[in-house]
Amino acid sequence: MFFMSATDGGEMNDGAVRHSWRCNAAGWIAAVREGRIESRRLVTDAAMLEAARALAPRRALDIGCGEGWLCRALAERGVSMLGVDAEPALIEAARAAGAAEYRVCTHAELAAAGLGRFDLLLCNFALFQQDLLPTLRTWRDLLEPGGALLIQTLHPHACGLPQADGWRLERFEAFAAGFPANMPWYFRTLESWQALLVGAGWRIVGLREPLHPLSGKPASLLLQACPDPGS
């Protein structure tokens, strides 16, 4: 989970998101593997892992897998894992750690990438773009019948930001060295997350708010969805 500062958007767009990850890949790998992010260490990693395991997938796709921690954790529990990320340096690190298959692939490229079908799609703090509606529509075709999508993201009410959709800027001020570029990301309210998924042809079947053990406040928003046959 990030510590974020509000901004009016300015020059930010989806391309700037990709640029920031290219610059910050080494810092991110170190931060995750060294356990520097308290909310992940205490709450959100376990929340995502437990939610995934509860669905008992045989084959799962981690979209925006980063350096591969979730793929490794689920592979150790017998799940056939494929991780994809748009940043080659993150995929290189994931491959070096082993335990799963990894490919360089953007969100928009997934439907045409010939990856087959999955019981479960996972997005763990990986949806930072503004225009996700067309992409989410195509992801329905990646699922086996009865499959599900799990999204964990920043809880809209827990970050102290204005409750209005818009671009924000992560400055990594609470992180150690290794993050030379600020990261833009698109903030959505809970209402907007729900409207996005429904508009893309998904039906929300579960919503959790994992609590931080020290503050007692929601550390994240965890949404479970399945394709809506009526869409």
Image (tube, rainbow, N blue to C red):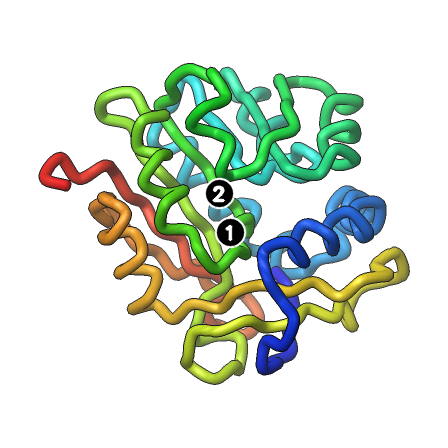
Where residue 201 sits: x, y (%)?
23, 44
Q: Which residue is drawn at 59% across and 73% down?
A: 168
Please say if the residues under marks 1 and 2 sit with CB atoms less than 8 Å apart: yes
Mark 1 Cα-neighbour bin, 10 Å: few <14, some 14–19, many ≥20: some
Residue under label 1, please give it.
Answer: 127
Amino acid marked by disc 2: Cys
- On the picture, is 88 further left or further right than 221? right
Image quarter hosting the N terminus: bottom right
Report the Cα–Cα distance between label 1 and label 2: 7 Å
Where residue 130 sits: x, y (%)?
48, 60
Image quarter hosting the C terminus: top left
Q: Which dot, 1 or 2, sits closer to the camera?
A: 1
173 up-or-down from 108: above or below: below
Q: Which residue reaches farthest front?
A: 11
Residue under label 2, please give it.
Answer: 123
Q: Which residue is drawn at 68% across and 68% down?
A: 170
Where residue 188 sits: x, y (%)?
42, 67
69 up-or-down from 81: above or below: below
31 up-or-down from 165: above or below: above
- On the picture, is 23 further left or further right than 199? right
Residue 192 figure quarter: bottom left
Mark 2 Cα-neighbour bin, 10 Å: few <14, some 14–19, many ≥20: some
Q: Which residue is drawn at 42% across and 51% down?
A: 132
Where residue 218 sits: x, y (%)?
45, 68
- On the picture, is 16 further left or further right than 145? right
Secondary structure beneath label 1: loop
Amino acid marked by disc 1: Leu
- On the picture, is 94 further left or further right than 117? right
Query: Closest to the observer: 145 or 182?
Result: 182
